[in-house]
Image (cartoon, grey):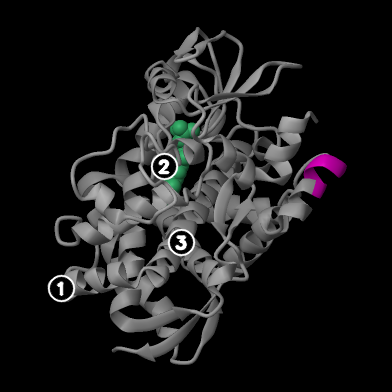
């Protein structure tokens, strides 16, 4: 491991913060065995995502075995496009209405469990809630007997940065779920497909669709990928947003006033524009996925300081792009108003990645966070009891608030 990689692995955020404003916006991680770069310069990001269909998407060494070798995240060509068609359509636009009542009920049931005086771990609470929502979307129900071991496995693999690194560098890879959990996930997906065709498992295995004959191994990889990608990210965003609103009383008051003026549950962005801006700013300042997936360049990628050559592995750095002062003045200040006046260009702000790999759940994730925040703010008065613990914890490739960050329910407002 060279000194740059060492600092990236062991002092990730201080290292990134020290580089965000470098004019080239390109940083060499290593030159051998193959060249690997972090990229965040807007010109290079735009170019990279525009030609994304031509680049390779191999995933990372530690993540690939975790989600499985045939996860849609590293499939290419027509098969990848077919996965996106089948799974992406129900996750955007008007189809999201289908999930509104379920998300609302899940959010409110979780809030019911928060009596006055309760002190709880914020990141764990949002993670449990988001996993239930995602499981219901995938299987049509949230079965604790399946979700508890799944969450325990995720925590064993990603819950402690030092453990994750020890697994990766000393034991040769992150722990896998094991045959029993794999089989239960596959069984749950096949049962859901037979009984509830409108679930994601049902759409995936539809008899008239391209994946009717999916074997158990490939099915397992997609189910794990959906559960993982669909809950860690949303949960981290919701937890960060609660933290930022706790730190910024004036903004919280404005959001409360916005919520008081509507009966909307957070679903419709037009009804709660400031709440949506809070979500967008949270995704900017504390992006739950600090780096998009690796790309292996199939052709030259120009940037302001030169050109990256074909064969180079490139990681688009979301965190660095979001903390570049030229793109986001005073980047460490939480300021949702940045998003109230016009669009921020996609080559400077891309919490959901881009190109042919743009996140399939970007609309779902944001609406879920808005609904969690609207429910919590309306029904509970909260206070972070140890805000100094509001420091990022890297969970594999995701960035959540530290599990030590705790919140107290000061009063119930309902
Ligand atoms: C706020 C929440 C979320 C954030 C910040 C987020 C972020 C991301 C990012 C950065 C990528 C990689 C894109 C790239 O490499 O260019 C991604 C991919 C993906 N996300 Fe999300 N995500 C969120 C929620 C969700 C949800 C709710 C789902 C539900 C299914 C989901 C499913 C996926 C899938 C399937 C991919 C892989 C797409 C592909 O490779 O074609 N995500 N997401």
The quarter holding residue 220 reads top right
Question: Left of 262 or right of it: where is 205?
Answer: right
Mark 3, residues whose alpha carbon is within 10 Å: few (<14), some, or many (≥20)?
Answer: many
Disc 3 designates what residue?
Answer: 240
Disc 2 designates what residue?
Answer: 351
Residue 379 position in % (x across, y down):
31, 82
Disc 1 designates what residue?
Answer: 263
* Residue placed most toward the observer, 118 or 131: 118
Q: Is residue 253 visible?
A: yes
Is 257 part of what is drawn in magenta?
no
Q: Main secondary structure of the magenta part?
A: helix
Q: Is residue 141 visible?
A: no
* Residue placed most toward the observer, 294 or 86: 294
* In the image, farthest residue toward the right: 170
User: Quarter of the image containing the C terminus?
Assistant: bottom left
Q: Nearer the viewer, mark 2 or mark 1?
A: 2
Question: Left of 50 or right of it: where is 169?
Answer: right
Q: CA distance from mark 2 to mark 3?
A: 14 Å
Q: Which of the two discs, 2 and 3, labels the residue nearer the N terminus? A: 3
Q: Residue at x 23, y 39 (%)?
A: 343
Q: Which of the two discs, 2 and 1, labels the residue nearer the N terminus? A: 1
């Amino acid at each position: 491991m060279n000194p740059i990689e060492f600092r990236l692995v062991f002092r990730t955020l201080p290292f990134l913060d020290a580089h965000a404003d470098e004019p080239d916006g390109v940083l060499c991680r290593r030159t051998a065995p193959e060249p690997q770069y972090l990229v965040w310069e807007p010109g290079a990001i735009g170019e990279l995502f525009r030609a994304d269909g031509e680049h390779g998407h191999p995933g990372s060494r530690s993540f690939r075995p975790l989600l499985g070798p045939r996860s849609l995240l590293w499939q290419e060509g027509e098969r990848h496009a077919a996965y996106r068609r089948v799974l992406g359509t129900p996750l955007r636009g008007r189809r999201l209405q289908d999930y509104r009542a379920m998300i609302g009920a899940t959010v409110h049931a979780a809030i019911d469990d928060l009596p006055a005086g309760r002190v709880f771990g914020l990141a764990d609470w949002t993670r449990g809630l988001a996993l239930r929502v995602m499981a219901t979307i995938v299987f049509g129900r949230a079965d604790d007997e399946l979700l508890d071991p799944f969450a325990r496995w995720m925590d064993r693999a990603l819950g402690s940065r030092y453990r994750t690194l020890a697994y990766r560098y000393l034991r040769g890879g992150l722990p896998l779920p094991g045959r029993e959990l794999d089989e239960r996930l596959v069984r749950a997906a096949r049962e859901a497909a037979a009984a509830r065709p409108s679930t994601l498992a049902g759409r995936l295995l539809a008899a008239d669709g391209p994946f009717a004959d999916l074997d158990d191994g490939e099915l397992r990889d997609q189910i794990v990928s959906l559960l993982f990608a669909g809950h860690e990210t949303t949960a981290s965003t919701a937890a960060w947003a609660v933290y930022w609103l706790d730190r910024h009383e004036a903004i919280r008051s404005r959001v409360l006033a916005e919520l008081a003026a509507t009966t909307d549950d957070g679903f419709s962005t037009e009804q709660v524009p400031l709440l949506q801006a809070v979500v967008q700013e949270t995704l900017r300042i504390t992006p739950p996925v600090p780096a998009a997936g690796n790309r292996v360049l199939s052709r030259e990628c120009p940037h302001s300081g030169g050109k990256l050559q074909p064969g180079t592995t490139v990681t688009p750095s979301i965190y660095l792009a979001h903390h570049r002062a030229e793109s986001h003045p005073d980047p460490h200040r939480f300021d949702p108003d940045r998003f109230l006046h016009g669009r921020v260009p996609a080559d400077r702000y891309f919490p959901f990645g881009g190109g042919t790999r743009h996140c399939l759940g970007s609309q779902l994730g944001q609406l879920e966070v808005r609904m969690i925040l609207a429910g919590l703010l309306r029904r509970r008065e909260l206070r972070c009891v140890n805000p100094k613990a509001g420091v990022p914890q890297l969970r594999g490739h995701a960035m959540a608030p530290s599990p030590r960050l705790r919140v107290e329910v000061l009063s119930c407002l309902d």
